[in-house]
Structures are given as structure tokens and as C-alpha cells.
Amino acid sequence: MEVIKGGVTEAKGFKAACTAAGIKYKGRTDMAMIYSEKPCVSAGCFTSNVVKAAPVLWDKKVVSESEYAEAVVINAGIANACTGEEGLSYCDKTAECAGEALGIPKDSVLVASTGVIGMQLPIDRICNGTKELAKNLSDTTEAGHSAALAIMTTDTKEKEVAVTIELSGKKVTIGGMCKGAGMIHPNMCTMLSFITTDVSIDKKMLDEALHEDVKDTYNMITVDGDTSTNDTVVVLANGLAENVKITEKNEDYKTFCEALHFVNETLAKKMAADGEGATKLFEAKVVNAKSKEDAKTLARAIVGSNLSKAAIFGCDANFGRFLCAMGYSGAMFDQNDVELFFCSINGKIEVFKKGVPLHFDEDEALSIMKADAVTVYVDMHEGNSSATAWGCDLTYDYVKINADYRS
């Protein structure tokens, strides 16, 4: 696998565009489109929140019922959530506008929205923006990058990645972009993620690959414990790489899944690191747990604890906070088996071993925790399972950002 520059436009046949439609933001782009020159098989995962936004309902129907998908229209600023039948009708209208502009059926158009909940979309601006997007589609790396910028809300930076692999002698490319900074918590989190690939693959295989991988990527990040109404990850595969079509779990499927995992994990970590107000990525790695589920539960509890997140912000090697979070996680374990370390590019230090706190150099621990990415490494010594979760520190700015989000 080779990591390359770019995002959603790197795979053959995919184009992107952005425009400033004036939906909520002034002086910046706020709409994006992804389009494939060839119809795609699609797969999607969506929020587990019972309160689902209109675009989620629309996209679930397209992914499950339409023969293929060919375009995605995304807006930032207004989430089109808690908007009733009117909000759902605006999804239909957006897809209709895109279909007319692109010459494709409206039921092959996915829509996605992110922003404030409870506001109706200015549908005239959305339709005008959609037409403008269709005119400006480009397959350049720059077009993909601009689309990634356009879908941000409280994000401080765009998030994209692309890789190439070889399947049956053909070069296959997978690219992706996402947005997400707040209301981040499994299952999934406040995120929109769009993956494009020119791989030739059966829809059932693509769906299984995505659903299995979400469990270890997007479902293992948290910023603030809130699961959103709009969470969507969609994969579009147009087959233009002309590899031997993947129809079973063979070596090509395994190689594709590994590359898809890299793309999804990279995007997930970018979201965690860019959590609202965050100054650093906070990773919890649990090894040698009794079961995979226990390892996941423990890792999520560590990165989800407000006290743990505050300790990471303060560069405080207060290991008790992390052990406490593990203790109320629901996973059963013996604290007398546990070892706990702090790690970063600045080093690794053990602070707790087999039920006993260790004497350690506070200055060394401070140096380790001052890094931009800090890992709490926990060895359970009770089995062979492991899991990793990602979050961020909790800062003063998180409250500032969310106290006036609507304005």
C-alpha cells in the first residue's frame, strides 16, 4: 500500500466541486459535491441515534434500495435534523436538482448535511448551489481538497487521505474526506465521511467490509460523549480500476479491507485530534484483555472520561483517573493484574504495576505528556485481545465553542 496526496478525487472517474451558497456561513464555501463518471455500488453506515436527520433517512433508502449511486451533495451550516416532512422533502428536492444538472436519476444521489439542528434549509440556495457544483466538477487533487474544506463546521482543518494498492495486477485507489469535531461519540459520531474507490467489488462484499471496519475505526473515537443525528459514512466504488471483481473473501478482499481500514482509521484519528478546543490527540491502547469487547470497553472508557481528558490537557500523570474510568466501564478485571504506561514521541514511562503505584520521574512524565499525541497504554495480563480508542483533551475552549454554537 502506498499513501498518496489527495482525497476523494484520486480514484479514477471521481470528480468534486465546492461553492459558496450562503446557507449559514458568509465569506466561505459551504457546499460540496462528489460525482462519479460511472455508476457506483455503494455501502453506508449511519447514526444509531433514534433521532435521525432527514439526510440519514434519505441515504439509507438510496444505499439499500437503489441499484446504484453516482453523486453526493453536502452542505455545511444547517443539519436538516428535527425538521419533519419538510426537511425530508428538501432531500428529495436537492437530489432532484442534482439529478437534472448531472443527467442522472435522483435516486442515485446521496445528500448530507451538517450544522445546527432544528433549522430548515434555505432550499432555493441549496438548489442554486447544487447547479453551480455540477458546472464546476473537476478530477484534480485541488478540487477534492476544496470539497474537504467546504464541509467543515467547527473543524479547524480539512481531513482527507488517499492510498493505492494492487489487486490482480491492477492499481486500485481509495480516497476519502470527512468532517467532525464535536458531538463525537460512538456509534457513530458527529461525522460525515465519504470514501471513493475505483475497485471492482460486489455490493454485498463492500457493505460487509465497511460495516466490519467501522467497529474498529469510527466507533472507537470520542470527543464529548454525544452521539449525533447526522452521522454518515458512505463508500462509492465505480469499478474503473478493472481489477478482477471481488465477489468473495479472497486475498484481494483482504488487501482491500486493509487499505480501507487505513483510510478509515486515518480519518477517524484526524477527527479525534481536531476535537472542539483540543490541543492534542489522546489515545488509549488496551492489550492482553480477556476479550475484544472488554478491550474496546476499557479503551473507550479511558478516552471518554472528562477527568482523564482534563488530565491530558494539564499534562498531569494522574494515573488514578484512568484506572477509575476502567473500573466503572463495565468490564470485569483484577486491578492487581494491570500495568499502566504513558507514551508519546518523547518516551514511555510506567506509573502503575500489578495493583501498586510506582515511583516515577515527574519531569519525565511531564515531558511525555506535553507531546501533541499522548497514549495511555494498559496491559491487562488477562488474555490475548487488544483494542485502541481515540479522543482528545478537554479544554476551556470546548465550552466556549458550544456555548454559542447557534450564533
Image (cartoon, grey):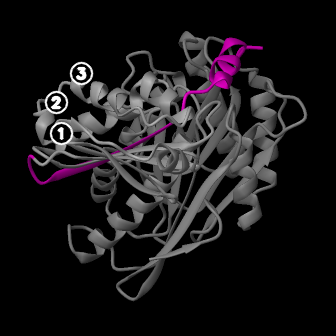
Few, some or many residues within 10 Å of mark 2 (<14, 14–19, 20+): some
Residue 187 position, x and y percent, is 36, 31
* Quadrant housing the C terminus: top right
* Near-viewer residue (297 or 370): 370
Mark sitting on residue 157: none
Where residue 51 sits, quadrant-wise, is: top left
- For badge 3, the amino acid type reads Tyr
Residue at x-position 17% and y-position 38%: 294
- For badge 2, the amino acid type reads Ala
Marks 3 and 1: which is nearer the front? Answer: 3
* Near-viewer residue (197 or 306): 306
Residue at x-position 75% and y-position 59%: 143
Highlighted range, magenta: 382-407
Q: Which residue is mark 3?
A: 328
Task: State which tag comes first along the sequence, 3 or 1.
Answer: 1
Looking at the rendered structure, the secondary structure element under dot 3 is: loop
Labels 3 and 1 touching (C-beta < 8 A): no
Where residue 284 sits, quadrant-wise, is: top left
Q: Which residue is mark 1?
A: 293
Mark sitting on residue 331: 2
- For badge 1, the amino acid type reads Glu
* Quadrant housing the N terminus: bottom left
Residue 147 position, x and y percent, is 71, 50
Residue at x-position 9% and y-position 46%: 382
Distance of mark 3 from mark 1, alpha carbons? 15 Å
Task: State which tag comes first along the sequence, 1 or 2.
Answer: 1
